[in-house]
Image (cartoon, rainbow, N blue to C red):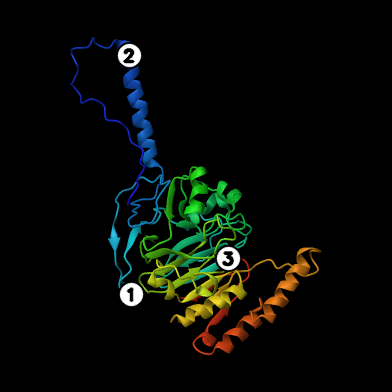
Amino acid sequence: RIIQASPSIATPMASGSRDTSKPRVGLGRRFRAILAWTLLAGLAAWLGALPALPSLGFAQIGALTGSRTRCGSLGVWSSQSSRHSHVTTARLAGASFDPLAESPVQGEVPAVGAKSSLRIKPLGGPGSFLLEMGGVRLLVNPSMGGDLRPESVHEIVDYVVLTSAKDAVLSQSTIGRMNLMKVNFIATAPAGAVLSSMMVRNLAILAAGPGGRVMATGQKGTAPVAVFVVPGTNPSWPWEAPELGFLFINLDTGIAVGYEAFGQYLGSGASSNRGDIPEEAYMIDYLVTPDLAEGAQVAKGLTEKGTVLQGVLQLPMQEVAAGDNPILGPLIEVDRKLDAALGGVGETAEEFLAFLEKQGPPLSKTKLHSPAQGEVIELVE
């Protein structure tokens, strides 16, 4: 179902028509009417000149609310030839601006490359990274602590993706500094509700289920990227909604990346038994995780379901040492020891790789990437 909310201007009476049964309008009233229509026409023209999400199309999306886009066309379907060629998605056209034009950090962020490119750059804040897939730039869970200024986001990236409404991931202070009339957002329903309250203009909300998908395209020469939502971390409380993970697929090459903000892509150990999980969720090449302990179990669960992971990318996190906090430190140390005693995986790269080696091929051949904040990792050239 498609929901579209577009500004509209009522059409005045055709020229030359007049209701003769009513007294003629005085000159003063007629002048004011003409002035009012002139102002309205100017306002409509101004609104039309604002950078919107050109040709933004949504179809077969589980939930689409709060959309303030002026859609050029709706329900444009596309099917690309790749190992994900059966993926049918709605087309979401990319921004009409050049993402590198007048960039204040040009040269420090990955340049738009070939259609096969795959680069990831961790940014400031937990779960915040810049994903460049096939030349399309997606800024995931922005929390600016690095070199990107929120005010310039619309000039640098094609889309901002928000995967959770939790305070640990969604930085309202960062989003509030963006140009909300120009940034193109893709979000889960809880995060979308927050954005709607901030009166953003271009917003696509994806809900769980087979229809929770959309296709994003960038500049000329870039590859289309399908964006899916999949099950994530189960809620801590019964009244909370479960978290959602995200799946990004380059429809030209079939390369796929999975991510969940708290490390449980497809649930703990990738063991979600929901019946609406898209088949593509089990066909990822790279897993992005903030937590190696969770990531190890997810990698194992995916492999048991037929996934052949090429690599796991660990997002940098601020560790809390046992002696740093008199309350949290001892609790964290006890939790680590208990987890190890129960056969869990440690949080260090060495423990993670040892766990993969113990599983044997193909999981033992999976590479681990641990970039520092601001470091660009080129997974596919």
How far is mark 2 from mark 3, CA to CA? Answer: 62 Å
Question: In the image, is 359 to the left or to the right of 285?
Answer: right
Residue 262 circle label: 3
Dot 1 amino acid type: Ser
How far is mark 3 from mark 1, CA to CA? Answer: 30 Å
Label 2 vs label 3, nearer the camera: 3
Could you tell me residue 298's position as x and y percent?
53, 75
Viewer-proximal residue among 219 and 306: 306
Tags 2 and 3 in contact by the CB under 8 Å rule? no
Q: Is residue 323 above or below residue 35?
A: below
Q: Secondary structure at mark 3?
A: loop
Could you tell me residue 212's position as x and y percent?
40, 60
Q: Is residue 74 visible?
A: yes
Dot 2 amino acid type: Arg
Label 1 vs label 2, nearer the camera: 1
Tags 1 and 2 in contact by the CB under 8 Å rule? no
Q: Which residue is mark 1?
A: 82
Q: Secondary structure at mark 2?
A: helix
